[in-house]
Structure formats: C-alpha cells, structure tokens
C-alpha cells in the first residue's frame, strides 16, 4: 500500500490519500476543510489524484464528493490514464457510472498502449462497466463526432480493438456484448504495431491463442472466418494447435461442420427487441452446442464445455405448456416467437433455422429474406409470444420449451443441423451473472497496469 502515498511532502496529503483509499469520508472532509487545495494535488511518482484513487478503489462516496467540488473528471495521471479508465480496469461500476454522469470523456487514450476506457473494460472482462460505457457512447458527443460503431471498434496503439483484447483474455461475455454492439468480427490487428506479438491477427486468432471455447463459439456464431490468415499466414486453427488448445482447434478446424451464423443482415433480425433477441440467441448457441458435441467427440477431452454453464432452469414445469402451444413445424417445442404482421407462431429453434437457412454473407449482406412458413407473407417483425395470463417472465417459457426435448428427430437447416435434444447451455444472458461476482474480490492496488 506504500505506492502512491509518497505525495508531495505534506503529511496532510498522505492522510488525504489514505482516507480516499479506504473511503473515510469524515476524515477526507475534515482534511479538505483545512486545505481545499489538497484536492488538486497528485502523488509525485504516478501523479495520481484523489479522484484516480477513489475510482480505482471503488470509493463511490468519496468520488461523488470530489466530483461535487467540480474537479475535472478527466484529470490525467502520469500514464495519461483518466479516473474512468482506472474504474473500468478495476470493475468499479458505480464509479464508472458516476464519472460518465459527470461527463467523463470516453474517448481518451492513455500513453501506455494507447487504450481507451472501453479497452480497459474489455481487457479486464468487466462486462457491466463495458455495457455502461457503450450505453454512454450512444448519447455522448462521441457518437456525433466519431460515430458509435467506430467507437466500438476503436484501436489501441497496437491496432487492437476492444474485441481483440476481450477475445485474447477469454472474456466471452464482453466478446458477445461487443459483437452485439457492432464490433467487426473479422477486423485484424494490422501488422505494424511494434509491441504487437501477433500481427495481423483477427479476434478468432486471439481467442484461439487464449483458448476460450466460449469466445470462439461466440465469434463463429457472429460470422468469424476460420480461413482468415494472420501476417504469418496462419489460420486460427493452427494457432489453437500451437497453444495446445485441442478442443478449440476442433471447432476451428476448417473441415469440421460450420456453425450456424447469426443472421444479422436480415432487417427484422437487426430490429429485434431485447426479449426476442435473447431467446433467438439462446437458440442459436444451443443449436451450435449440439453441433459441437459431434465435433468434440473426437477430441481427447470429449466432455462438453464446462458444467458451470449447465442451466439451472431445468426444473420440471412442463405442465405449464399445453399441447395447443406446441410449434406446428417441429411438434416438439413450445411456440415462443410470433411472426408479425400475420400472427403465426413457432418455436425459437424453428425461427432460427428459417432465418439461417440462407447463410448470410457478411461481405455482401445480400440475403433473401425468409417469409412466414405458414402463409408466405413477409416478416415485418418477430416478437416474443405473450402468454394469456401474462406477466410470467420469459424464463418460464424458455425453461418449459427447453424441456420439450425431442422425441422426434428432424433436421432443419442445411448440413448437420439438428435441433433434437437441445443442450441446456445457458444463454449469453445467463452467462451474464458469472463475471460480476469477481469484482468484489479485486485487489485494491491502484497502480497495476494493463
Ligand atoms: Zn419448432
Ligand atoms: Zn404467417
């Protein structure tokens, strides 16, 4: 804890920083009353301000008090890091939110590796902070000056986007969030960054190197190209082999079955509401997990990805669904998706199979839009089916539909796609809960660096 406390001389200053670090509001206030200028001083070595220390340590009350005294929220330390960057690095969501509210600039670059707060959140896997920054980016001046999607794909000094960093660091939840926000799945790091150890890598190369099946699965489902080469001519498959990630390599092997790809070019898919999107994404991941079973069967560790993903929502509430709600395409799952304007209903896997039937080509984005399989009318919108005695949350529908494990096997889309016996892997939304608990255990060392 000695670092950062070697401040400019005064005992008061040391006191001030200590009380900020531990969140001693009374002492902090008392010290400032005696000498208000303390607020604008910084530590000698790292030039950390009280605001940096409060942000890095998640001392929200102190942070608020400092901001209330009109301290510049974008004050820089020795490495040109803003308090927002440190809060994002340490997963201090409350501080991130308060700093954003105070107008902190999300488009500042540090002098270490030229990274923004979005890079920090992605690298350290703090998906809640990442989401907060993305939300802010929609309304901040950055959206006007830079454009939102350009911000999502902002590069650091080595050409790495937040997606690259998240994929490399095995942050699957951040990977998904970024893809969902328009991160370019096939962008490469470029070959010129001096410090870059893997020039010309795509996020898929970096995920292959990091060895995260979840990241690879998400990237592939968003259309990552298994055949794209890095500057050394390697495809991701070769990278995974090099780092001994056998199961990742199996998915990345160009000769193994291709996963279903999220049909993002479809207009009604890009306009899905959150509820319907979660449902369809879950169906996509489940369908792909089912495909994986066959692919991974041949690898040395043939179990399916970690049991921690197993869905807790498999209680037996099958009685919730009467047969009249069964999807009349597969006669297997409950109808959860309604086609508008015609009002026909089907289950999420069948909807997905319909949309993925013509594999979208991300470069041309030309894809014939599917029509309602019942009446052949155009699909204006897909929404989640509302049950009559509503207000039941969607999870209920989902878990009951999930229980309708297949008794009949039917193949829907091309290739080996089968929705039979869908695995019970959690959705991205479910995965959401996993990372955040870690934050509390974060170390309080405010000087650690990326
Ligand atoms: Zn169906
Ligand atoms: Zn219809």
Image (tube, rainbow, N blue to C red):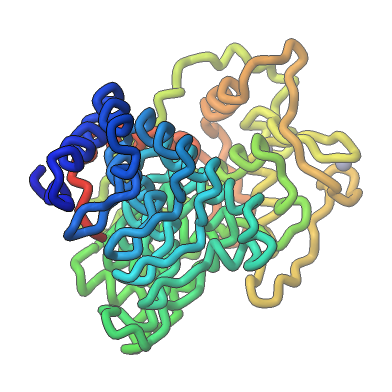
Residue at image x 59%, y 12%? 319
Query: Horizontal placement of 328 versus 163: left or right?
Result: right
Residue at image x 71%, y 51%? 269
Residue 1 visible, this angle: yes
The location of residue 251, given as percent across then percent down, is 37, 63
The location of residue 34, given as percent across then percent down, is 28, 32
For the residue pair 3 and 421, the one nearer the viewer reads as 3
Q: Looking at this rendering, what residue extends furthest in the left direction?
A: 2
In which image quadrant can residue 417 be found? bottom right
Residue at image x 38%, y 36%? 63
Q: Looking at this rendering, what residue extends furthest in the front direction?
A: 34
Query: Horizontal placement of 246 versus 103: left or right?
Result: left
For the residue pair 224 and 107, the one nearer the viewer reads as 107
Looking at the image, is 344 positioned above or below residue 72? Answer: above
For the residue pair 64 and 153, the one nearer the viewer reads as 64
The location of residue 176, given as percent across then percent down, is 48, 52
Residue 250 visible, this angle: no
């Amino acid at each position: 804890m000695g670092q950062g406390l070697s401040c400019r001389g005064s005992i008061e200053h040391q006191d001030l920083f200590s009380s900020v670090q531990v969140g001693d509001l009374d002492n902090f206030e008392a010290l400032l009353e005696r000498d208000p200028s303390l607020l604008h001083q910084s530590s000698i070595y790292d030039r950390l301000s009280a605001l940096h220390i409060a942000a890095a340590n998640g001392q929200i009350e102190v942070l608020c008090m400092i901001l209330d005294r009109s301290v510049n929220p974008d004050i820089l330390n020795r490495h040109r890091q803003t308090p927002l960057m440190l809060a994002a690095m340490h997963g201090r969501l409350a501080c991130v939110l308060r700093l954003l509210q105070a107008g902190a600039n999300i488009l500042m670059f540090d002098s270490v590796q030229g990274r923004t707060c979005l890079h920090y959140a992605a690298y350290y896997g703090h998906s809640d902070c990442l989401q907060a920054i993305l939300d802010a980016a929609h309304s901040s001046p950055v959206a006007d000056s830079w454009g939102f999607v350009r911000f999502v794909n902002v590069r650091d000094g080595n050409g790495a986007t937040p997606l690259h960093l998240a994929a490399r660091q095995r942050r699957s939840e951040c990977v998904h969030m970024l893809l969902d926000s328009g991160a370019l799945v096939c962008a490469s790091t470029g070959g010129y960054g001096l410090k870059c150890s893997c020039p010309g890598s795509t996020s898929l190369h970096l995920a292959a190197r990091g060895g995260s099946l979840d990241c690879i699965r998400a990237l592939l489902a968003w259309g990552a190209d298994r055949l794209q080469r890095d500057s050394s001519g390697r495809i991701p498959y070769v990278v995974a082999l090099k780092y001994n990630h056998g199961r990742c390599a199996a998915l990345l092997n160009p000769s193994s079955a291709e996963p279903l790809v999220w049909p993002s070019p479809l207009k009604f898919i890009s306009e899905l509401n959150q509820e319907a999107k979660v449902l369809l994404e879950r169906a996509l991941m489940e369908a792909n997990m089912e495909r994986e079973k066959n692919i991974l069967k041949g690898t040395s560790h043939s179990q399916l990805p970690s049991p921690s993903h197993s869905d807790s929502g498999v209680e037996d509430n099958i009685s919730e669904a009467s047969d009249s709600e069964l999807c009349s395409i597969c006669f297997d799952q409950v109808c959860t998706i309604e086609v508008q304007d015609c009002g026909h209903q089907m289950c999420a896997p069948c909807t997905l199979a319909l949309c993925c039937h013509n594999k979208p080509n991300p470069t041309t984005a030309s894809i014939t839009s599917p029509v309602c399989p019942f009446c052949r009318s155009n699909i204006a919108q897909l929404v989640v089916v509302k049950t009559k005695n509503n207000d039941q949350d969607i999870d209920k529908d989902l878990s009951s539909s999930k229980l309708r494990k297949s008794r009949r096997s039917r193949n829907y889309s091309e290739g080996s796609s089968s929705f039979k016996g869908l695995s019970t892997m959690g959705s991205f939304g479910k995965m959401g809960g996993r990372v955040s608990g870690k934050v509390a255990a974060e170390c309080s060392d405010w000087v650690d660096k990326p």
